[in-house]
Image (spheres, rainbow, N blue to C red):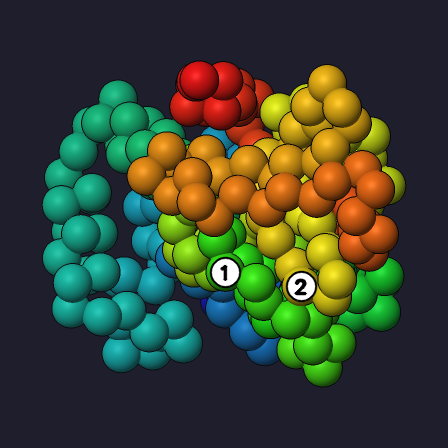
Amino acid sequence: MDFGQRLKGLRLERGYTQQQLSSAVGVSVVALRSWEKNTKKPAMDTLLSLGRTLSVSMDTLLDFQLGNASKSSLVLSSAEKGLLKKYRALDDHGKKVVDTLCAIEAERVSIQQRPVPRKVINIEEARAAARYIPHFTSPSAAGVAAPIDVADFGMMLADDSVPDAADFAVDIQGNSMEPYIHDGDTVYVRRDAELSIGDVGIFCVDGAMYCKQYYLDENRNLILVSANPDLRDTNVFVSADSGHSVQACGKVLLDVRLELPDYLFED
């Protein structure tokens, strides 16, 4: 009796249809049919699962093979033969323990070998979802007038580090806004935001860009204030009747609200 006949006989003895047994073992009906026809042989982990499902030991399932290994179409390695020899030496309780443990380990390996579904990313949708904002690389001066150069700008990806309210980014030149904004920093700006006294903004005065604190004195004169007291001489004063061209380009988005420096109110 070959392996296929033996397997079919055990299946029928236990009252399984091919569909029922293949489902219980976790294989296709086509695979089970090929085993019963003896055209193919199951892997060792599947043999263990068959034995457990049919309530027979590996010794019973393979006894016809081990008795005449030279005629066997089921090829076993030396290690597998050694394990089977040890298995045959066990009593029924020991065999059940090994069968259960092998079934558990076979399931673990099977799960590990299952392909992980890959998330398909639609490039066009990803691009549409990504947010880009203008990045002005021509510096906004913190102390030194920096002329506007519309050519010095590009688009930057607004990642998680960019505030949601940011409309554009500007590179800073100078250290008059230290310790809050440093030379070379990139600040994020909200366009058309209403400025309150003390807010940091980006200002354009007669074509030159500044990053300063906003202040109006009692006479409605504009003072663009340097936060760094050592660089108070870089403040920009624009009298109410000066006729200078002044534009507030937006509010710099900071994690903290800045108070106006004390030196501004010294006599």
Residue at 72 percent of width and 56 percent of height: 205
Residue underneath mark 2:
208
Pick the residue in front: 209 or 138. Answer: 209
Residue 85: numbered disc = none
Viewed as shown, does residue 118 lie left or right of 88? right
- Residue 166: image location, x then y, percent: 72, 44
Residue at image position (20%, 43%) is 88
Q: Position of residue 94 (x, y in %)?
A: 22, 27
In which quadrant of the rendered view does residue 132 lie?
bottom right
- Pick the front one: 213 or 218: 218
The residue at the point 14 percent across, 39 percent down is 89
Nearer to the camera, 107 or 161: 161
The type of residue carrying mark 2 is Ala
Q: Is residue 265 above or below residue 114?
A: above
Q: Is residue 82 left or right of residue 124?
A: left
Q: Quadrant of the C terminus?
A: top left
The amino acid type of the residue labelled 1 equals: Val
Can residue 251 be spotted in the picture? no
Earlier residue among tags 1 and 2: 1
Instruction: Indicate the secondary structure of the residue bearing disc 2.
Output: strand
Mark 1, residue position: 144
- Establish if 215 lies above or below 111: above
Residue 125 at x, y percent in the picture: 85, 62
